Image (cartoon, helix red, strand yellow):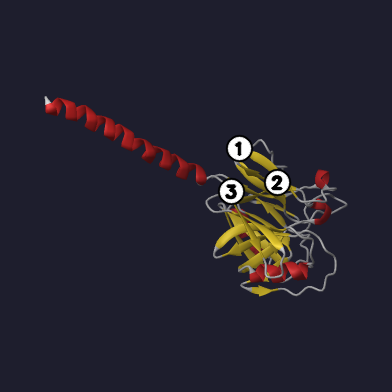
Amino acid sequence: MIQKRILPCILVLLIVSSIPVTVAFQKISLDRTALRVEKRKATSGNNYTIFYKDDLMIDVSLKRPQKDDPSVLMSIPAAFTEVVTIKPDGLFIDHGIVFNRNKINHTLGGAVKMIKGDCEIFPSNKGKLLNDSLINHVASLKGSLFQQIQLIEKGKGARFKDVKEFQRRAIVKIKNKTAIIESFEHITLAAFTSDLLGLGITDALYTDMGSWDEGWYKKNGEVITIGRIRTQTAKQCNWVIFKNK
């Protein structure tokens, strides 16, 4: 009689104890596809937002990312846009397709290549290192690449004498992780670079800002617009995105 009473109790306990395990597993699964956002303050007092790639993929797009696309969690303008042609400024490779091979920008000191969801920021020596060998290698892997201003290379910051102040944004490497960082305050490139070094950034590549600055990211299902000027949003022609695998 006692055994008959004990067996149902054991079954109930087993069922109840299994519920938290299932819920915990679901939370971990969802977190892997979420965008991790962190607020940091530099020693200068300037405030920053860091968007971590983590298990997401970084990619480029020549087609405007759609906010209702569930796979895209963040979108920002990438390379500068030529104001006459409204096309990317400098060499641009989009998933193996090469644009502007003969229009390399020799005033920009850096570039980023993206292959299979990861990226590498590297100096281009004012475009001199963007040779046929590199271009063909990236294209053969169906990778992507664009030129920009390199702010930091292996922990060493570039020197700038600029005086114009804008909100700033960059693709960065921090503790071997890929992220996008954005300043809250409007500052010079020199101040931005100094702050990034102080925050532990080891490599940084600028992304288009000023009047081209509009971007967005998703938090808890809500689309949050970033960038303040936004007057050239309609003319944006290329983007960096974080997306699910």
Disc 3 marks which amino acid? Leu
Q: For mark 2, what is the residue?
A: 216
Q: In front: 3, or 167?
A: 3
At horizontal 65% and vertical 71% (from top left) the residue drawn is 198
Lower sequence index among marks 1 and 3: 3
- Considering every residue shown, the one lying at the far left of the view is 1
Disc 1 marks which amino acid? Pro
- Mark 1 or 2: in front is 2
Identify the element where label 1 is drawn. loop
The quadrant where residue 51 appears: bottom right
Residue 150 position in % (x across, y down): 71, 67
Mark 3: few, some, or many residues within 10 Å (few <14, many ≥20)? many
Whether 222 is drawn above or below 107: the answer is above
- What is the spatial separation of the Cα atoms under label 3 and label 2, in whole angstroms? 12 Å
Tag 3–tag 2 contact (CB < 8 Å): no
Q: In front: 207, or 19?
A: 19
Mark 2: few, some, or many residues within 10 Å (few <14, many ≥20)? some
Tag 1–tag 2 contact (CB < 8 Å): no
Q: Is residue 124 visible?
A: no
Q: For mark 1, what is the residue?
A: 70
Disc 2 marks which amino acid? Trp
Identify the element where label 3 is drawn. loop
At horizontal 37% and vertical 40% (from top left) the residue drawn is 21
Residue 78 position in % (x across, y down): 72, 54
Whether 114 is drawn above or below 24: the answer is below
At horizontal 69% and vertical 63% (from top left) the residue drawn is 205
Lower sequence index among marks 3 and 2: 3
Residue 69 position in % (x across, y down): 64, 37
Q: For mark 3, what is the residue?
A: 35
